[in-house]
Amino acid sequence: MNSLMTLVEQIATQHNADVFYYAGPISREGYDLITQCCVAHVPKKNACLFLATYGGDADAAYRIARALRHNYEKLHIFIPRECKSAGTLLLIGATSLIISDRGELGPLDVQLSKPDEIFERSSGLDIMQSLRVLREETLSFFTRYLIDIKVGSGITARTAAEIACKLTVGVFSPIYAHIDPLTLGEVQRAIAIAYEYGERLDNYDHNLKPDALARLVTGYPSHGFVVDRKEARDLFVNVRATEPNEEQFGEMLYQHAQPGRDIPWVSNLTIALQSEINHTEDENEQTQCTNPKTDSSS
C-alpha cells in the first residue's frame, strides 16, 4: 500500500470517517460529485473533507455542506492551503476546522459579473468599500467647509452650514451619479443570501463565535484578505492545527490537484483505499493459487 493510502487509512481510523478531497471551484458540478461520493457506499459515522478552493457559487457551497451533514454525524474540514469566499461559507457547516501552517481562509465576499465583460467578476467588497470611503469623505468635506466658512467670514452657523452643504453637494453629486442602484441592490441581495446560508449552516454545531458571520461578510477590506489560523480562532470555536500526518497528507493531495482548476476534482478516498485493499487481497489469493505448497509427506 503506497504512502498516500497509508495516510488515508490513518486519518479514516482516527476520526472514524470517510475521507474526501475537493479541489477547484465551488459549483453545482462539485455538489453532484460530492453527492455521488456520499452514496457510493455505506458511509461511516463522520466525514473528513480536505478542501482547496478559491471560491465559487454560494448556493452550491450551501448544498455541499448540507449533503455532507445529511450523511454524516460530524464534519471535520481540513484546509491545507487556500479556502476562499464560497469555500469559507462551506466551512460554517463544519464541526471543526483543522488548518495547516500554510492554510488560509477568506471573507464571504460577493462576486458580481462585470458589465460588458465575459468571464470577469468584481468584488462586492469593492463597492461597499467605495461607498464607505465616499461617505467618510463627504462628511469630512462638509465639516472642513463649515469650519472654514464660519471662522473666516464670521457669518451665522446656519448660513455657513447652508453654503458648506451646497459646496459639498457640488463636489460629490457627479461621483454619486455614477453609482448604479441596480448594482447596489444586487450586492445587498447577495449579502443577505450569505447571511441566511451562514445562519442555517451554523445551526449544526454552532461553531461560529458571536458576530463572526457579520465580520466574514462585511468586516474585511478585500476579496483576497488572508484569514490565517490565528485569526480563524477569533471567528470559529473549534479550530486546531494539523498533526504531522494530516499536514503531510494535505500537501500530497494539494500537489495532486490544486484549487486553480476549471472544474472541481472530487474524490472519496476511503473508497479508493478499500479498492486498493481488495485489489491487494485478490493478488495475494492469485499468488497462493499459482504457487501451492508442496506436500512434504510425499
Image (cartoon, rainbow, N blue to C red):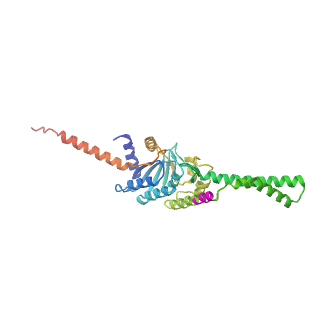
Figure disc tally: 0
The quadrant of the rendering that contains the N terminus is: top left
As for residue 8 lying within the magenta part, the answer is no
Which stretch appears magenta? 182-189
Taking the spot 25% from the left edge, 45% from the top edge, the residue there is 282
Q: Is residue 20 left or right of residue 241?
A: left
Q: Residue furthest right?
A: 154
Closer-to-camera residue (19/64): 64
Q: Is residue 257 left or right of residue 119?
A: left
Residue 210 visible, this angle: no
> x%, y% of residue 117?
56, 49
Taking the spot 41% from the left edge, 48% from the top edge, the residue there is 11
Residue 289 visible, this angle: yes
> x%, y% of residue 148?
84, 52
Q: Is residue 285 left or right of residue 238?
A: left
Closer-to-camera residue (223/199): 223
Q: Is residue 69 left or right of residue 207?
A: left
> x%, y% of residue 181?
64, 59
Taking the spot 77% from the left edge, 52% from the top edge, the residue there is 141
Tell me where residue 289 sits by quadrant. Answer: top left
The quadrant of the rendering that contains the C terminus is: top left
Closer-to-camera residue (232/256): 256
> x%, y% of residue 180?
64, 56
Q: Residue furthest left?
A: 298
Q: Main secondary structure of the magenta part?
A: helix
